[in-house]
Structure formats: C-alpha cells, structure tokens
Image (cartoon, rainbow, N blue to C red):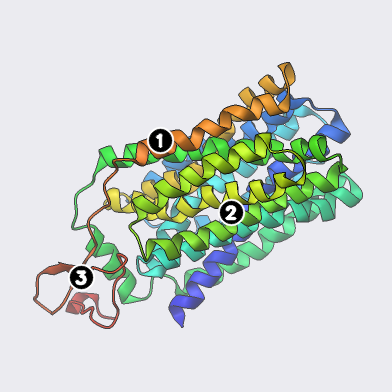
C-alpha cells in the first residue's frame, strides 16, 4: 500500500510539473494572436524554456548523485508555476523570455531528483516508472485544455491562474516524500544495480537517440496547433484539439511501453516504436484532412512508448550515477528538442510550415539507427539468503519481494 501511495503521489505531482512544459507550447498561439509574434519569435519562447533547462538539467543530476536533495521537488514545482503565471503579464518580449526561462529552470531542477525518488519508491520496476512517466504525460495532455480554459476565455492577463497546479503539486510532493524511500525493497533495488559497472558508451548512444526523439516531439508540440489551424480551418479549437490528441497519445504510449517491456526487452520495444513513429510523423505532415488527428495520436504514442524505458535503461547503463542518468533521459529528453525550434520557425517563415515540419520525419529514423545494436543491460541482482551471493533477477528486471532477503543493516 505504501509503495502504491508513493508512486501515485509522485505521478500526480509529476503531472502538475509537466503541465508547465505543455503550457509553454499551448501558449504559443495566444502570443501570436495577442502580440503578433512570427514563427521565429514564437519558437524563441520555446527556446528560452528549453535552453536553460537543457543546460541546468545535467548539473542538477550531478548534484543528486552526490547527495539526496528531496526539498528540490516542492521548490522546483513552485518555480515552474511562477514562471508560467507571470509570462502573460509583461508585454515585452524579453520579459516573456525571462519568465518562461524561470519555468524551464524549475522543470530542470525537478526531474533528476524526482527520477531518483521514483526509482526508490517503485523498487526499480518498469511498471512503477511507467506510471511515474504517465503522470508527466497526463500533465502535458491537460496543458492545452487548461490554457484554453484560462487564457482562451480571458486573454494572457489571466496567466496567474495557471499557478494553481503548482500549488497542488507542491502539496503532493511533500506528501510523497513522507513515504517514498522508506521501503527496504527500494534500498535493495538501488544497492543491487550498483554492483554493475557503468556502460558509458551505451549511455551516450541512448542519449543521442533521446535527443532525436526530443527534437521531433518538441517540434510537433510547438507548431502542431498552428499547423492544424491552417490545414483544417477550425481556428483555435482545431489547434487545441490537435495538441490535446498529441499529448493524450503520449500518455497511452507510456503505459503501453511498460507493458510491452514485460514481454520483450526494452531495447527491442524502443526500436519498433521508433519505426512506427516514422510512418505516423509522415502522416501528420502529408496526410490531408482530419486524418491529422489519428496520425498525431499514433506519432505521440510511438514516441512515448520508449519514454519510461529509456529512463530505466539510462539508469541501468549508469548505475553509479542514476541522478545524472535520470536528468538526461527524463528531463533533458523533453527540453533539448526546444533548441531546434528556432530553426524550424525560421524555415517556416522562409517557406511554409509543412516544409519546416518535413525534416522531423528523419528524427525517429536516427533514433532507430542508434538503438539498432544497443545492448540490453544485464538484469539487476538480488540476494536469495543472508550470506548468499547475488543472483540475477530474470523477470522484467523487477525485484521479487517474496524472495528478497535483507542484510541486518538494511532492516528497519
């Protein structure tokens, strides 16, 4: 019960933080409409949130590898909400960039430590990390609906109301920290993975695949709303629907990825999902009419099936630096794609939005190539007796709580 409560609280808290990553993209059409931003200026807003987050994320990851900093969870949640709440109040472009950069900093501070805590709370299971990732994806999915309900009805001057999820998320983080990490199974999961050495080369290849995935997803989330408005002629409603479908597909993909990893190894599941994504992203760009919606959903699901699996893969490749691994695969995976957004925006200004989105089809291909020969990490280890040697766990890399025994020092 404690395990389930911890993961549930962490997952909902993750949703409250990732609302603000989705909100940045959801606010773009309103910046365009109220402030007259062009594609390049609009993509600069995404860049401001992504750039600081991308730089800071590995630094926070290294910090969490040196010491536990659980207080970062509530503080970073508040910081992310503060930046988004203020971004609609100042009319100047520079002030808007500063506010969304504050949001990016909050997001950067949250993810490495939350990945570490979630790993402990889940006992190292795919399914637990899948539910944790699902929370973030639901936050993404709800962001355009929340922004439409608040900003769509009252304009950018109402962005302070968007701070409410941050307040709720802060309370959930505090509650989760009271229970997460107390279970001896969690400590044994962490200790078991540390018996293996780091596989830095595999982690670098995985990280490059994560970057390619991030570019295509952030590119779609930044411009899909405007693209749907152009193609379908439904105004802001068509754009909001397209963005919601994109994020909702990601939520489905997260849960599906954890289930598939219980049947096949994680690397195989990631490779096949990227091949599906190639076809789906091509459909978003070139298939005409309302078929854009199912293509967007399939593209997002294909891109999010690997999401939680890449987090646990990264932590298994770097068992001595799980904070850094989590910060890169969980947080940087989402933010670094924003660095390519200005290039997409400039190309769209010079040609057309469809032409600018077309290169995104190649990104899942590159991810597939990087994962094609990537090895599946060895299974974590468990103790089968007080003085027994460590033995591999053979089912889904999960610790079987019925057979795990703990040394006296590990007992509560």
- Residue at 35% x, 50% y is 267
Question: Residue 263's spot in the image, x, y percent?
Answer: 36, 65
Marking on residue 208: 1
Percent x, y for residue 236? 85, 44
Disc 2 is placed on an element classified as helix
Which mark's residue is nearer the viewer, 2 or 1?
Answer: 2
Which type of secondary structure does the marked residue at label 3 adopt? strand
Q: Which residue is mark 3?
A: 382
Which residue is identified by label 2? 250
Q: How many marks?
A: 3
Q: Nearer the viewer, mark 3 or mark 2?
A: 2
| Quarter of the figure with residue 37 | top right
Q: Position of residue 142 (x, y in %)?
A: 70, 57
Q: CA distance from mark 1 to mark 3?
A: 31 Å
Mark 3 in CB contact with mark 2 (< 8 angstroms) = no
Figure quadrant of residue 41: top right
Q: Please tell me the numbered disc located at residue 190.
A: none
Q: In the image, what residue occupies the spot 61% across and 53% down?
A: 18
**141 above or below 217?**
below
């Amino acid at each position: 019960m404690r395990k389930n409560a911890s993961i549930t609280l962490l997952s909902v808290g993750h949703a409250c933080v990732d609302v603000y990553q989705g909100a940045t993209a959801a606010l773009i059409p309103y910046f365009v409409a109220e402030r007259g931003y062009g594609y390049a200026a609009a993509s600069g807003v995404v860049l401001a949130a992504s750039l600081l987050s991308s730089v800071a994320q590995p630094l926070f990851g290294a910090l969490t590898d040196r010491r536990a900093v659980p207080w970062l969870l509530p503080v970073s949640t508040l910081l992310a909400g503060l930046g988004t709440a203020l971004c609609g109040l100042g009319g100047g472009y520079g002030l808007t960039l500063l506010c969304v950069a504050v949001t990016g900093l909050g997001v950067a501070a949250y993810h490495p430590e939350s990945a570490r805590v979630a790993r402990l709370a889940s006992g190292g299971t795919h399914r637990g990390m899948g539910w944790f990732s699902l929370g973030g994806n639901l936050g993404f999915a709800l962001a355009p609906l929340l922004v439409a309900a608040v900003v769509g009805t009252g304009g950018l001057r109402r962005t302070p109301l968007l701070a409410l999820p941050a307040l709720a998320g802060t309370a959930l983080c505090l509650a989760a920290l009271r229970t997460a990490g107390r279970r001896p199974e969690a400590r044994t999961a962490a200790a078991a993975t540390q018996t293996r050495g780091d596989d830095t080369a595999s982690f670098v290849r995985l990280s490059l695949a994560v970057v390619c995935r991030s570019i295509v997803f952030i590119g779609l989330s930044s411009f899909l709303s405007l693209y749907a408005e152009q193609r379908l002629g439904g105004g802001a409603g068509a754009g909001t629907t397209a963005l919601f479908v994109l994020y909702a597909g990601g939520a489905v993909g997260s849960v599906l990825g954890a289930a598939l990893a219980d049947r096949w190894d994680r690397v195989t599941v990631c490779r096949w999902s990227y091949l599906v994504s190639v076809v789906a992203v091509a459909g978003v760009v070139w298939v005409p009419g309302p078929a854009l919606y199912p293509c967007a959903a399939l593209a997002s699901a294909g891109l999010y099936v690997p999401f939680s699996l890449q987090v646990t893969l990264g932590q298994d490749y770097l068992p001595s630096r799980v904070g850094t691994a989590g910060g890169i695969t969980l947080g940087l995976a989402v933010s670094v794609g924003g660095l390519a957004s200005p290039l997409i925006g400039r190309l769209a200004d010079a040609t057309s939005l469809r032409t600018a989105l077309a290169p995104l089809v190649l990104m899942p291909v590159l991810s597939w190539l990087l994962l094609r020969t990537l090895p599946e990490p060895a299974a974590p280890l468990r103790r089968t007796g007080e003085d027994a040697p460590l033995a591999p766990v053979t089912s889904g890399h999960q610790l079987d709580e019925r057979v795990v025994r703990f040394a006296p020092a590990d007992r509560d």
